Image (cartoon, rainbow, N blue to C red):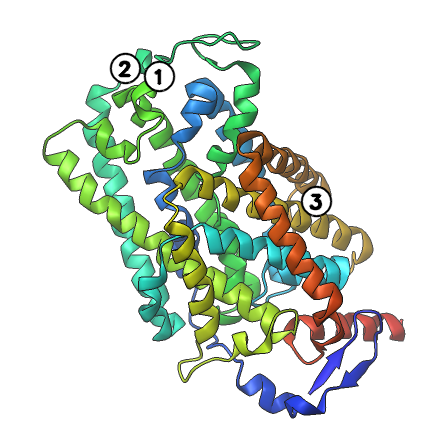
């Protein structure tokens, strides 16, 4: 098998691991299993549990006004980011997603940094998903179809909630949190202007993980066409669900009562048949996100392992072409973290990883546009680097906001990130697999540059 040193463009040989063909045969995913509709369903599935709970803690940070303004800003950031990722995924369709983009634009260090940030996000976000691993071991085609059905049920639950809640809606309920003495405080912004910033990590919960759609690129049908369509369709659907729950939950149940609720949609309905129905269907939203994030973290870990950034044993696939250890190991980590019972803290930690990866991915888009203007791009981002520069600025603010909300949680994630980077710097960067898909992209680019 060939490996490549990050400081050199020429491969070196690692005879102890056998031939590259045998190595890759043990690390192949099942291709051509998902069209754009399933990919869009995957994108919604990643996020749908965030509509049912978690986002409402932002009411405590910024009140309805602060969270609403934060949600508009974050929705704009995500839409801009999704457009940038749609372009990069059409040009570089591989299982690494954001890691693949950063590897091409920012080199091995950038690839490792982005992949690690995504792993932090996806390993923490589910926090209780180990028991759902069995479906994924059956293969990606079956798993995506199961997730699609469960996601459809969860969306139906939101419609039931909306029909039941609209009769109890009152504009006064949105602003029933008493204003503090903070600068700019009012009934609309009870915690002042700073509350908008503090609410940003919770607004991200409305959309967090939709960027994982490109992780399915190697398993999609015609990925250059279907991945951009899927991720953009998912984002459009999520904007609608965000607006629905953001207004109707505090509007029906009161912002003050909903700001610390662990089950806000159900509690906003009070009691009755709709209350019971939404309570049970809400479980589908949680299961949908759990299933899909298992898929996401396994593919990110698979890609990093296959290329040698992390231990290579983690990328070996089973007879169904699913990466067994890449599914199990982060699941154990998530399960152990779930034992803390600290939902708001785990949310902030997941947002830290997400925001850091967004910063690096948007930089990657800008660098690729400037450095490789002739790179084949079946889809091009409207607005080009202006669009992704906007997303970059907001992502930086979101990253800083995680320290504002919970400095211990954010600092803990930063330490974990530093340890991963130390492992790469001291060990794995000398053992990268030259024949893996992401390193091959770089090799082809180097060859083309040499010819020119």
Q: Nearer the viewer, residue 68 or 416?
A: 416
Disc number lying in front (3 or 1)? 1
Q: Earlier in the sequence, mark 3 or mark 1?
A: 1
**Pointer 3 with pointer 1, Cβ within 8 A:** no
Dividing the picture into quadrants, the one containing residue 266 is top left
418 over 391 or under it: above or below: below
Mark 3–mark 1 Cα distance, whole angstroms, equals 37 Å
Answer whether residue 77 is visible to the viewer in this image: yes
Q: Position of residue 173 (x, y in %)?
A: 31, 15
Answer whether residue 84 is visible to the viewer in this image: no
Q: Quadrant of the C terminus?
A: bottom right
Q: Secondary structure at mark 1?
A: helix
Residue drawn 53% across and 75% down?
315
Q: Quadrant of the N terminus?
A: bottom right
Q: Find disc 1 in the rendering and name its residue.
A: 174
119 over 220 or under it: above or below: above
Q: Position of residue 126 (x, y in %)?
A: 40, 52
- Category of crowding for the residue at label 3, using alpha-carbon neighbours closer than 10 angstroms: few (below 14), some (14–19), many (at least 20): some
Residue drawn 86% across and 70% down?
449
Q: Find disc 3 in the rendering and name its residue.
A: 384
Q: Which mark is residue 170?
A: 2
Residue drawn 20% across and 40% down?
278
Disc number lying in front (1 or 2)? 1
**Pointer 1 with pointer 2, Cβ within 8 A:** yes
């Amino acid at each position: 098998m060939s490996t490549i040193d990050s400081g050199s463009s020429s491969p070196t040989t690692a005879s102890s691991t056998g031939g590259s063909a045998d190595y890759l045969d043990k690390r192949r995913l099942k291709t051509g299993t998902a069209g754009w509709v399933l990919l869009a369903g995957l994108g919604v599935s990643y996020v749908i549990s965030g509509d049912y709970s978690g986002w409402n803690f932002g009411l405590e940070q910024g009140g309805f006004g602060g969270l609403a303004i934060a949600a508009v800003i974050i929705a704009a950031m995500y839409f801009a980011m999704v457009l940038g990722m749609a372009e990069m995924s059409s040009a570089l369709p591989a299982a690494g997603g954001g890691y693949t983009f950063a590897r091409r634009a920012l080199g091995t260090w950038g690839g490792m940094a982005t992949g690690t940030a995504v792993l932090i996000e996806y390993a923490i976000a589910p926090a209780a998903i180990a028991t759902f691993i069995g479906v994924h071991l059956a293969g990606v085609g079956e798993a995506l179809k199961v997730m699609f059905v469960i996601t459809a049920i969860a969306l139906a639950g939101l419609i039931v909630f909306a029909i039941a809640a609209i009769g109890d809606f009152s504009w006064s309920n949105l602003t029933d949190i008493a204003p503090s003495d903070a600068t700019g405080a009012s009934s609309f912004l009870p915690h002042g202007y700073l509350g908008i910033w503090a609410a940003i990590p919770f607004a991200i919960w409305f959309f967090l993980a939709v960027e994982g759609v490109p992780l399915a690129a190697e398993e999609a049908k015609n990925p250059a066409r279907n991945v951009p369509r899927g991720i953009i369709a998912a984002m459009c659907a999520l904007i609608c669900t965000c607006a629905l729950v953001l207004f109707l939950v505090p509007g029906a149940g009161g912002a003050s009562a909903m700001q610390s609720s662990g089950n806000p949609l159900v509690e906003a309905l009070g009691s009755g048949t709709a209350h019971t129905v939404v309570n049970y269907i809400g479980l589908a939203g949680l299961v949908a996100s759990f299933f899909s994030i298992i898929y996401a973290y396994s593919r990110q870990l698979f890609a990093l392992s296959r290329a040698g950034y992390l231990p290579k044993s983690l990328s070996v696939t089973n007879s169904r072409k699913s990466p067994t250890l890449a599914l199990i190991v982060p699941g154990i980590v998530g399960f152990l973290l779930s034992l803390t019972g600290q939902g708001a803290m785990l949310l902030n930690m997941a947002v830290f990883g997400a925001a850091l990866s967004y910063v690096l991915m948007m930089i990657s888009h800008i660098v690729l546009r400037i450095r490789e203007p002739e790179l084949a791009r079946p889809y091009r981002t409207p607005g080009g680097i202006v669009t992704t520069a906007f997303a970059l600025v907001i992502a930086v603010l979101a990253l800083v906001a995680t320290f504002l909300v919970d400095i211990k949680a954010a600092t803990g994630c930063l330490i974990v990130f530093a340890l991963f980077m130390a492992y790469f710097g001291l060990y794995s960067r000398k053992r990268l697999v030259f024949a893996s898909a992401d390193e091959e992209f770089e090799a082809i680019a180097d060859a083309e540059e040499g010819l020119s």
